[in-house]
Amino acid sequence: MPAMRIGLRRHGAAWLAAALALSSAGTALSQVRVMAEGEVDAPGEHLLENRARLDDAALAAKARPHAYLAGAAWLRPALIPQQTRLKAGLLFDLELLARLAGGQGNDRLVALATGLAAQLRAMPVTGRQVALLDGRVLEVAAAANLPVADGDRLVYPARPRTVRVVGAVERECALPHVALRDARLYLPDCALAPDADVDTIQVIQPDGRVFEQGIALWNRGPPVPLAPGAVLYVPLRARLIDPVDPVFNREMAEFLATQPLRAEAGAP
């Protein structure tokens, strides 16, 4: 009888240990880890319930008063494969363009395509998704309050003071932001490449939204004011890039939109 009691106690202890292990595993599975970075009062990893949404993550991060919410970035591992394929396709297009231009003796276009490819290779694949990251607004904006997943990151930058002009330019420009200034009016302050498109530009606002603006007399649209930190991508001429990939310029702008804002010297 004593041996039976000891055996029961042992089995009971084993069952309790197994139950605790299962409970612990269940708790771990019911949580997601979200990282907060940049201008926040609570940087680092936050454990949230597995049904947590952007407002939960944003409120946990505690963005500082001077954080630039218009440029905050939601970086999602789930989007890395898709954006990796996009980057690879763009690099392939630029390499093909350089080969075709070289075969035609167009050294100028070879240099432009090669330079763009080098810049693109240096850009990380981030998994950024366009999103509103103001926790207070998200609490009442149900449609924008999307679910977060394990490994997601929220990055809150300081407010920038410039607008960048990239793409088919002699060299990348960082120009002072001017409130309410139309996007196309920044172009005269940056030397464009001879092979730049003269009809359109791709506007990338700091929240990651991308849209095309007509800049020629025949297609000029209404003024488009830029927010601080916006990027203007100057496309390649359609007659040069369309034989390689007619959607190259749009996809290049979309990849540029995945890049979080750069830190500026002297930013708060």
Image (spheres, rainbow, N blue to C red):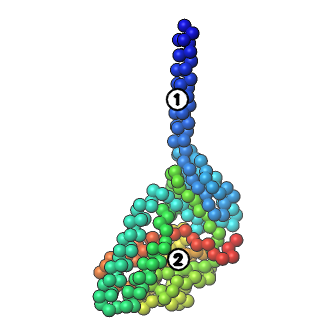
Taking the spot 55% from the left edge, 75% from the top edge, the residue there is 230
Query: Which mark identifies residue 231?
Result: 2
Across and down, in percent, residue 116 comes to 44, 80
Whichever of labels 1 and 2 marks the residue nearer the N terminus, that label is 1
Quadrant where the N terminus sits is top right
Across and down, in percent, residue 210 comes to 47, 72
Q: Establish if 11 lies above or below 261.
A: above
Tag 1 and tag 2, C-beta contact below 8 Å = no
Across and down, in percent, residue 212 comes to 44, 77
Is residue 196 at all visible to an observer of this figure? yes
* Relative side of 241 to 203, left or right: left
Numbered disc 1: secondary structure: helix
- Residue at numbered disc 1: 18
Task: Give the residue type that dot 1 points to.
Answer: Ala
Q: Quadrant of residue 102?
A: bottom left
Across and down, in percent, residue 168 comes to 45, 84
Q: Residues within 10 Å of mark 2 (few under 14, many from 20)?
A: many
Taking the spot 45% from the left edge, 60% from the top edge, the residue there is 79
Quadrant where the C terminus sits is bottom right
Residue closer to the observer: 18 or 93: 18
